[in-house]
Amino acid sequence: MIPIGAELCKMPWQTGDCIHISTFFYLTKDEIIMTSTTKITGAGGAAELMRNTRLITLPNGPKVKPTFSAAEMQGRTDKLRAYMARAEIDVVLFTSYHNINYYADFLFCSFGRFYGLVVTQDKNTTISANIDAGQPYRRSFGDNIIYTDWQRDNYFHAVQSLVAGKRRVGVEFDHVNVENMQKLKAALPDAEIVDISKACMAMRMIKSDEEIAVIRNGARIADIGGAACRSAIAVGVPEYEVALASTQAMVREIARTYPDSELMDTWTWFQSGINTDGAHNPVTSRKIQKGDILSLNCFPMISGYYTALERTLFAEDCSDAHLKIWEVNVKVHEAGLKLIKPGARCCDIAAELNEIFYENNLLQYRTFGYGHSFGTLSHYYGREAGLELREDIETVLTENMVVSIEPMLMIPEGLPGAGGYREHDILVVNKNGSENITKFPFGPKHNIVKN
């Protein structure tokens, strides 16, 4: 591949498969060197130009200030390469948001196109679509190669250019779909393709000090979103207005704290009344009514790193039936906070908390696990399934894991105390126990809102 952006003379060229953009020079197989405003002439013309332009490089501007230090990023890569050596994996192709972001500090926007990160023992290269131009290069820890849209499956041509000749290739079995797996095997017919996803998830589950620093800031910013949300709550106000107040406050604080970061994906779910029954129910135009149960869910996203604040609240007053259920959920939440410590098994934590709900005849109203991990994840990528506080997860908590405690009850309409109840705090596991980095208050004493 011929790099683009070099100074060229107007003379015959025999080979070439690269093209620059805008006012730079084009390089083709024909005797053509021109700017974008020049008509294409010569044998083959436009069709051949497009056909021959499959891969390009575009180091457009300097690298931006990264989220993490070079030492941090190199440390992650070194651990991956050590695992690759032990597992006799020659090269890894990542395709997921979370692993590309974790190992390259680049969070892509798919919009129907495919992205990748190829890691060998001596090189990291992100693969991006031409529509993003130089942004992936500027953001990536390592090199970048771009594929064009001018031929179908140019993405797999890019993979082939970086991976061809390798005997054993690691990919994410939990992310590559059947169609793309078939295309990958066709592009790499002599390679053995093996899974890398579970091993990488286990590495991501233990956070570094730099990751914990980002997560701490995320928890702090979530608290700011919660305060803005609480201030916006009033009878007659629609859910979306409350959510907007929270999201705007969080985005502004992320921009202030991380002025060199990209601002994307931060959101708020604020639910009222019957809409509180699902933890992930979207915002609506429903207006808050007096006595409504409310659910505050603030999610600041910092360079692909997720944090959350979730709270049960009530508008103006809380019925006795609602108060009784709320207090039980708070009791379970407080008990869960005490159970997060090194050596505890996820399944044992879930079993112990189940007993409290069972004693209060509420266990049947649970809807999901008691907590999960944090890091590079969002509602559409990255869940670390090996670190969830559920009955079927036997993972033992260790230092530098970060988990939530978030019990939820959902009482159906027509029953006393109907609605969804949820509290959510983030805890960092340390040598002696854990530290709760969420500071927003919870429970009836603080969250019956009378604005």
Image (cartoon, rainbow, N blue to C red):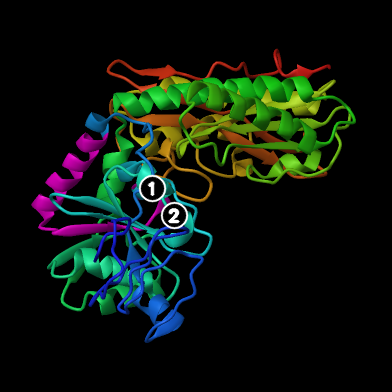
Residue 333: horizontal and vertical position, in percent?
Answer: 55, 25
Q: Which numbered circle lies on residue 60?
A: 1
Q: Quadrant of residue 391?
A: top left
Question: Looking at the image, is 122 positioned above or below residue 174?
Answer: above
Task: Indicate the secondary structure of the residue bearing disc 1.
Answer: loop
| Image side of residue 2 versus residue 294, left or right | left
Q: Where residue 297 appears, x then y in whole percent?
A: 63, 33
Query: In the image, is 115 to the left or to the right of 171?
Result: right
Q: Which residues are magenta?
A: 73-99
- Specify which label sits upstream in the sequence, 1 or 2: 1
Task: Name the amino acid, label 1.
Answer: Asn
Q: Quadrant of the C terminus?
A: top right
Does 335 appear in magenta? no
> Does the magenta-highlighted stretch encompass residue 85?
yes
Q: CA distance from mark 1 to mark 2?
A: 8 Å
* Residue placed furthest toward the bottom: 43
Q: Position of residue 165 (x, y in %)?
A: 13, 70
Spot occupied by residue 145 in the image (x, y as percentages of width and height): 31, 58
Q: Which residue is mark 2?
A: 133
- Tell me the residue at 61%/31% (across/down): 298
- Residues at circles 1 and 2 in contact by the CB criterion of under 8 Å: yes
